[in-house]
Image (cartoon, rainbow, N blue to C red):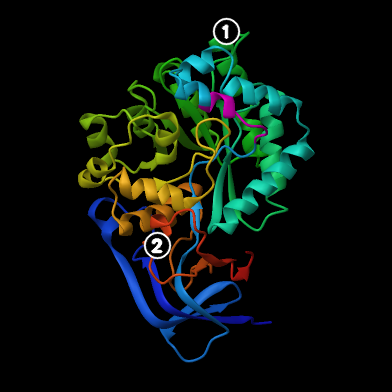
Amino acid sequence: MNSMFVIHAERILTPSSPGPVRGNNMMKISEFFDSDIVIEDGVIADIRKHKSADVKANLVTPGLFDAHTHIPFVGSRSKEFYMRSRGKTYMEILQAGGGIHYTSSLVKNASLEVLVEISKDFVRKFTEHGVVGIECKSGYGLDKENEIKQLKAIKLLRDVVPNKLSGTFLGLHARPKNIPIDEYIDEMKALLKYIKENSLAESVDAFCDKDVFLPDEIEDFLLYAKSVGLKIRLHADEIENVGATKLGVKVGAVSVDHVLKIGSEDIYVLSNSDTVATLMPSTSFYLGESYAPARDLISAGAGIALGSDFNPGSSPIYMPSFVMHLAIRFLRMEPEEVLNAYTVNSAYVVGYKSGLIAPNYPADLVIWKTSEFLDIPYMWQENFVEHVLINGRMVA
């Protein structure tokens, strides 16, 4: 049976083309006034001048996609926030057994059911702030059993939330404590075929940086992952420039993430590739680190996606409005670039055809209480979301 739903929008803002949008094209958006979005069976059928509608809206944009989170996890690392404020570095805390290792100990002690329940609440909070799609990662298991437990939690989560989720295997998240590095990488590599065959993840990721995993240690791992049909993601050059961005381009990564410490040569290589840079200014904010060179990346022709890096230690943020605020203020991105980055480009990285208000696209939409897009990052603590639609169904 045909199901039709019509939104009358005072204003519509949408990217003008599918992702990934790159360089100067990130300034291109389409704007409609006093128009109806006609939805049939969860898909946008038409954008027309206003005739009649079921719902009145001030502003409608595509639903937001968060291209980088660390769901599922349990617990908090608030004490580390205090330690960093008193001079300890992220790596010093990690090497002393805190950081990722601390969260790993909590995840290992949590049941699969608990991981799913806590993650469901996280996703609900994202949804209430306009996020329709989320990338979720393992990486707090740090052994075969618990990495698989995290991936199973992501798979089960898909059945209990309406959001568009993608799973990423991040077995190479921290150097192991009690096992040689080569042996650990081989152990994680042995899981890749099983993960693909059992649809436990669409991508693999690795923390490629100083004192974590270096390019020559993980290149074979990434190439094997690609050979079994998994897409590549990389935590790249966040702490120090170790050549991770260049490795990501070399192995055909969908995105390289963070890239705080890249230089002009990395930017050139990245901008001449199909790889997107996923930026998370909230991590720089929490760690007191420098911000990624977004302006240089865009000027060189690269594509940028945005994410929260939502995790218990270095970015406990699920509010895209705050990420937008930081992107405009510290990454010096324009509002149009932010809209492209948080919709079509992030949807591309997460692996969905979405992020565009156009015929034949899924009706993944946010109805906002304000007609001014800039209000959202300006008053980031105010939740301007009125309704969220996923595949044409109101979910928040």
Q: Which range of residues does the magenta coloring cover?
A: 73-81
- The relative height of residue 371 versus residue 104 in the rendered view (above or below) is below
Residue visible at 52% across and 17% down in the picture: 93
Residue 52 in percent (x, y) is at 51, 90
Residue visible at 70% across and 40% down in the picture: 153
Q: 211 or 281: which is nearer to us? A: 281
Q: 95 or 298: which is nearer to us? A: 95
Q: 46 or 386: which is nearer to us? A: 386
Residue 392 in percent (x, y) is at 59, 71
For the residue marked with disc 1, what is the amino acid? Pro
Residue picked out by circle 2: 375
Residue 385 numbered mark, or none? none
Number of the front mark, 1 or 2: 2
User: Callout 1: few (<14), some (14-19), or many (20+) C-alpha neighbours within 10 Å?
Assistant: few
Helix, strand or loop at mark 2 = helix
Q: Work out which residue is located at the far bottom of the displayed protein and give it.
A: 51
When asked about the image quadrant of residue 217, the answer is top left
Helix, strand or loop at mark 1 = loop
- The relative height of residue 205 versus residue 386 in the rendered view (above or below) is above
Residue 272 seen: no
Q: CA distance from mark 1 to mark 2?
A: 51 Å
Q: Can you say which quadrant of the picture contains the C terminus?
A: bottom right
Residue picked out by circle 1: 180
Residue visible at 46% across and 36% down in the picture: 233
Residue visible at 64% across and 46% down in the picture: 122
Q: Can you say which quadrant of the picture contains the N terminus?
A: bottom right
State yes or no: residue 74 in magenta.
Answer: yes
Residue 357 seen: yes
User: Callout 2: few (<14), some (14-19), or many (20+) C-alpha neighbours within 10 Å?
Assistant: some
For the residue marked with disc 2, what is the amino acid? Asp
